Image: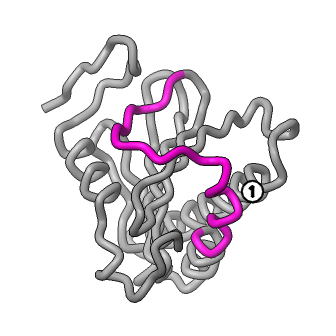
Amino acid sequence: MAINRQGSFDNYVVTEKYLSIRNTALHYPAKELGKFAQNDVYGMVIDIPMNPVLLCTLTVYANGACNLHFNNGAEYTGAALRHQTVIQPSRMLVANAHHLLPEATLVKKFPLPMGRQHYVYMLTKKGIYKRAIDPMTIRNDSTAAQNIYVLYQRLMQAMHSAQLKDRDINA
């Protein structure tokens, strides 16, 4: 069942499945992944608008696990289990997230992005931090934001390559 959430927050039609998965990813416990200090980033949830009606959410964790979820209920999961090439960019992204943490705000609400902005949520034991990144102005943004943007774009490329390999295997 699709939910039309038009209003002041966003204009994406989302499924209950998508909202549930996104909420679970945002609240994934650190203890499931290992030992982390209070301010260590152990996971990230990145909302990436693909076009005015399609929203992609990338979930990535310190152990290299990563998944793609879409507002229409589609998903691509388990790539790190099948493709070694996805693990390194996943780990690299999470390992470098601490550079962006000082520019982020501790949040308790998790709206979907508006316009072209990407919302980067960083999971720590202390709480969830949010930093918006605008791909149209990334060149004028901080070095930390630019680096994180490049790292999650590389991960998206690795995920795309893995998805193409999976498609060829299943064809």
Identify which residue, 162 or 81, lies in the foreground. 81
Q: Amino acid at mark 1?
A: Val
Q: Quadrant of the N terminus?
A: top left
Q: In the shown orientation, is residue 58 left or right of residue 76?
A: right
Q: Can you say whether 114 is above or below 128 in the image? A: above
Identify which residue, 133 or 55, lies in the foreground. 133
Q: In the shown orientation, is residue 83 left or right of residue 29?
A: right
Judged from this view, the residue extending furthest toward the right is: 140
Within the magenta stretch, is there residue 110? Answer: yes
Q: In the shown orientation, is residue 90 left or right of residue 63?
A: right
Residue 83 horizontal/vertical position (percent): 51, 82
Q: Which residue is mark 1?
A: 150
| 10 Å crowding of disc 1: few (<14), some (14-19), many (20+) | few
Q: Residue at x 45, y 82 (%)?
A: 36
Give residue 28's quadrant in the image. bottom left
Q: Can you say whether 135 is above or below 85 in the image? A: above
